[in-house]
Image (tube, grey):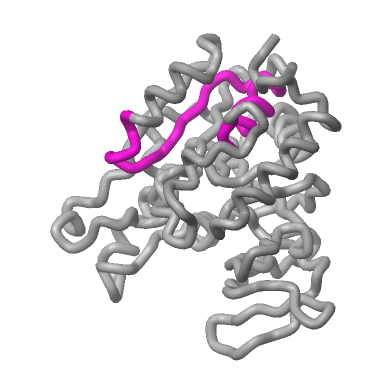
Amino acid sequence: MNTELHDTSLVLMAAGSSTRFDGFKQFADVGPNGEMIWEYSIFEAHRQGINVVVIVTRKELKNHFSKLLKKKIPSEIEVHLCVQELPDQLKNQRSKPLGTGHAVISALPFMRSRNIIINGDDFYGRSAFTEAAKILSSEKTFSEPRLISFPLEGCLSLSGGVSRGLLILEKQKLIEIEEFTEIKKEGGGISGLGDHSGPMDLDPKAQVSMNFWLLGRDFVKKMESGLGEFLSEMENPISGEYHIGSSIKSAAEKNDIAITCIPGNSEWAGLTHPADHYIVRSFLSGKHKKAGYSNPLWSK
């Protein structure tokens, strides 16, 4: 356990609508003892010495989350639930949350000075958290964003196409995030749809963002300052989203800050399609046997 991470929090983005999943992914039991996928992230962060957790969710899910957290998470972990509320000018135009970048901003009141920001419906593996703890504890002032990335071939679904942001890098510095949809294994390779093109063959070894970000609180304030400009220029108030990748990149460019990418070698698993539920349950059942997870997860 790293004692230098006392001023670090884990932020879980869990306000998604789970449109392609059968029910809310946030509450899918994936562990052999009914564990939910975000429990493993809290467990791994706690293992590294991070005892402050912020969960960003939807208003209608807050009460259920609260009951689960009291039942499942040890009392020594400080957990804050915050609701991702729409900006006032959008409340009469949409119900869908404004995006992952906005979710991060919503967590600001509870954030510590250093933060691991992740999806609430992904399993990232132990080595990703170990690497994150190493980075966060090695710098006295943490100002430059970091992104722990994953190889594309390890971040697919066996049940259907997925959307991923492929990273264009130069000496580990992030240059661009190229978005692809409907990525799947096909004909011995991997293909996906680009923003302005038909199907393309993709490099299985390409690094992708799975939203495992390391951000200082001061940098998140820079993201917050860019929200007003985004809202004033948003073409479609019903479907527009303030995405985490583009909002971080925009804030970094405006403040002349580099974004460093750290290629990870951790195993990933996630929930997109209904059939992924069984696949992830089987995967995590094996993890309990091989990775030393207790049964149940939080037993001492």
| Residue beneath the point at 58% across and 72% down | 179
Residue 40 is covered by the magenta coloring: yes
Is 179 situated left or right of 127 in this image?
left
Residue 39 is covered by the magenta coloring: yes
Name the foreground residue: 284 vs 252: 284
Q: Quick check: 188 above or below 68?
A: below
Where residue 254 appears, as percent x and y from the top left, is 49, 60
Q: Quick check: 116 above or below 183?
A: above
- Which portion, as a residue range, is magenta? 35-63
Where residue 251 appears, as percent x and y from the top left, is 48, 56
Is 156 situated left or right of 17 in this image?
right
| Residue beneath the point at 60% across and 17% down | 6
Where residue 221 appears, as percent x and y from the top left, is 42, 43
Q: Quadrant of residue 249?
A: bottom right
Name the foreground residue: 250 vs 48: 48
Q: Quadrant of residue 142?
A: top right
Name the foreground residue: 246 vs 11: 11
| Residue beneath the point at 46% across and 30% down | 54
Q: Quick check: 115 above or below 228?
A: above
In the picture as drawn, the residue positioned furthest to the bottom comes out as 198
Where residue 34 appears, as percent x and y from the top left, is 58, 30
| Residue beneath the point at 36% across and 51% down | 225
In the picture as drawn, the residue positioned furthest to the left comes out as 92
Q: Classify the position of the N terminus by image quarter.
A: top right
State whether residue 45 appears in this view: no
User: How many marks do you count on the picture?
Assistant: 0
